[in-house]
Amino acid sequence: MSDVILERPTPQIALVTLNRPERLNAMTVDMIDELLAVLDEACGDEQARAIVITGGGRGFCAGHDLADFGGEGTVAEGMKVQEAFAGLTMAVCAQPLPVIAAVNGPAAGGGLALALAADTRVCATSARFNAAFVRLGISIRGRTIRGPNALPVVFER
């Protein structure tokens, strides 16, 4: 099964689901590439009016899957990951359609950057935010905060 699923609940909505719930939707570089391709596909549809990104299971996105390094990562591997996340946030910011992050659980590290790159966020009461990359002494390059609408809106069900 794919790590990124594109669904059309209505012709106008492109619902993108990160589909690695067993890893809280932590992303690998390959998954980031898959997400970028799905975003391109969604924007290529003339009927689409908005993109909603959410996580499968109980988490939005735990950021980078550290198991993706396969042990101790090199500096070059670390930079490849940083560049991939930076490219993702820039691509989300550049989408011609409005992007909504439906944050349904933890959004940590690169997952937080992904949520902040969206035009707006709709958050469940289970949403949690963590800038884990700061503790590692790194940053997610690129424009990730989009002005006053960066504050989450929380809805109870």
Image (cartoon, helix red, strand yellow):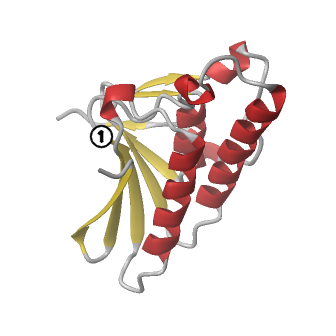
Q: Nearer the viewer, residue 122 or 82?
A: 82
Does residue 145 show up? no
Does residue 60 show up? yes
- Side (left or right) of 13 relative to 46: left
Q: Nearer the viewer, residue 29 or 126?
A: 29
- Above or below, 151 against 138 in this view is below
Q: Looking at the image, which residue sits at the far front?
A: 70
- Expressed as whole percent of the image width and height from the top left, the position of residue 124 reads 30, 33
Q: Nearer the viewer, residue 91 or 50?
A: 91
- Side (left or right) of 48 relative to 75: left
Q: Which residue is mark 1?
A: 56
Q: Residue at x 60, y 48 (%)?
A: 117
- Above or below, 4 against 107 in this view is below
Q: Looking at the image, which residue sits at the far top?
A: 135
- Side (left or right) of 117 relative to 7: right
Q: Looking at the image, which residue sits at the far bottom?
A: 46
- Expressed as whole percent of the image width and height from the top left, the position of residue 123 reads 36, 37
Q: Residue at x 50, y 56 (%)?
A: 34
- Expressed as whole percent of the image width and height from the top left, the position of residue 125 reads 30, 26
Q: Residue at x 59, y 24 (%)?
A: 70
Q: Secondary structure at mark 1?
A: loop
- Above or below, 68 against 5 in this view is above
Q: Alpha-carbon neighbours of circle 1 within 10 Å: few (<14), some, or many (≥20)?
A: many
Q: Quadrant of residue 138?
A: top right
- Expressed as whole percent of the image width and height from the top left, the position of residue 42 reads 43, 71
Q: Looking at the image, which residue sits at the far left?
A: 157
Q: Label 1 is placed on what type of residue?
A: Gly
